[in-house]
Image (spheres, grey):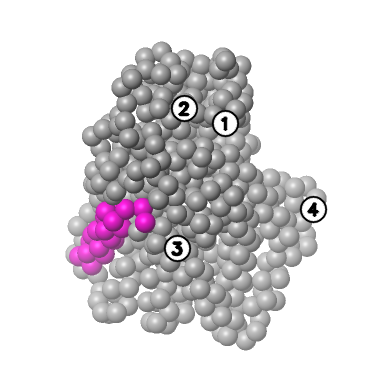
Amino acid sequence: MASIDDTSVTHGGTMDADGNTLNPTGADEKTWGSFAIFNIWANDVQSLFGYSLVASLFISFGVGGWTAFAALITAGLFVMWMVNLSGAPGEKYGIPYPVFARASLGTQGAKLPAILRAIVAVFWYGVQVYFASTAIALLIYSITGASGGAEYLGLNAIDWIAFLIVWAFHIVIFWRGMNWVETFLNIAGPFVYLVMIGLVIVLWQRSDGQLLAATATIFANPEGTFWTEAKGFIAIVGTMVAYFAAVMINFSDFSRYAKDKKTMIRGNLWGLPFNMILFSALALLTTGGAAVVFGEEIINPTEIVERTDSVVLGIIAAITFFAATVGINLVANFIPAVNGIANLSPEKISFRKAGLITSFFALVIGGLWVSFISQVGIGGFVNTLGAVLAPIFGIMIVDYYVHRKEQLSEADLYNMDGGIYHYDNGWNGAAVKAFGIAAVFSVATVWVPWFAVLSGFNWVIGAALGGVIYNVLAKKPA
């Protein structure tokens, strides 16, 4: 039997920062408690986009506040169920998503979904580096009072300095290993909440106590009919499920570090429904306070901070936006990108090498975002790759729970030349066929206008199709 690393199929060794990131997590690495799992989701929702998305749900969908909150809680519970399913094998065997995918797709076939997930992650990693750099640029402007200047590729000198600072900061974090990633997430999550509460207090003071009344106005929506409430409920659930779709498929990248299964489940319970309630409540209060103080419902927190004309608040907010953006970047983009790239050649590409490759592309993509990519727009390209991944989730879940009864052979997962997961030259024909058929539908939801009626549920339907078709085509292990 030819294994990548004969020691990689045991749980006794520790993977250092420069080691093989795909090796099973050692017992001394499984240190993440429920608080760390909670902060994965706190950081995933606390981005500037996440705030604007949640705040807009109470305004754009024409539903009452209770309906919106019920939809958010429902979405949180559904995503929690899905990540508990996809994260269980990662926690049990200490394996990341690309290795888990080998059981159903094959030792070679798993490279396809892993690299597709990595491409999506690398692109957004670069874009988020740019977004985080705008917070640092705001900090520099607030402290120095400097103005712009000549631009090169859409950014002036200060913008470029801020961009390079953020880019280098990411390298420092991952270079120190996953313990540093965990530490940063544990600090950033609570810190962002503290600042959001502080912003609510500032708006409360400036609104002369009218904040709750304005929030109640947004919350009530007395004109909503049963059908508008029902359609809004479905649309909000679909939107939030789609928002978390990428992390759902590769949650084993994080659950592998959980102390045990109960810790993972408890962390997901607090991290998803509770986070959705807390973050949504703060976003609603902030939006309501802004409506009183500034006369309009503002869903962009940076605009709210700018209108307060407070240098101190501006500095604090800049640090907060930076922490929030880096947090979601590590969770949703960096880790899946590193594991996907390492899976191309596990014996040659270490954690640090994969991180440097990710950082290089982030430098290129982030640097070109303002001057080229954002102008041309490649949303269809990225959304297509994301839709293609949907059937993989269903295939992996059906294979693990229905066909294999939650039992995997670690040795065979790392045997690239033979074993039960080698199938036909490393490819599982049944999974490939199920993936191809279901992916046609998933991609159609991006490009065919008729499928727009499915809203955000196209990912869920694509995953379900992948699982059902695979269950019909695949032979269950003896």
Q: Identify the residue position indicated by label 2 in the image.
A: 409
Q: Identify the residue position indicated by label 1 in the image.
A: 406
Relative to residue 358, is residue 265 drawn left or right? right
Relative to residue 355, is residue 286 drawn left or right? right
Q: CA distance from mark 1 to mark 3?
A: 31 Å
Q: Residue furthest right?
A: 226
Q: Give the class, few, some or many, for how many residues have Cα within 10 Å of label 4's Cα (few <14, many ≥20).
A: few
Q: CA distance from mark 1 to mark 2?
A: 10 Å
Q: Is residue 119 visible?
A: no
From the viewer's side, name the closer residue of 452 and 326.
326
**Where's residue 156, x and y in %?**
22, 63
**Where's residue 322, x and y in %?**
38, 65
- Circle nearer the N terminus (3, 2): 3
Q: Give the class, few, some or many, for how many residues have Cα within 10 Å of label 1's Cα (few <14, many ≥20).
A: few
Numbered circle sitting on residue 313: none
Question: Helix or strand or loop: what does disc 3 sit on?
Answer: helix
Q: Quadrant of the C terminus?
A: top right
- Of tags 3 and 2, the one toward the viewer is 2
In magenta stretch: residue 432: no
Numbered circle sitting on residue 225: 4
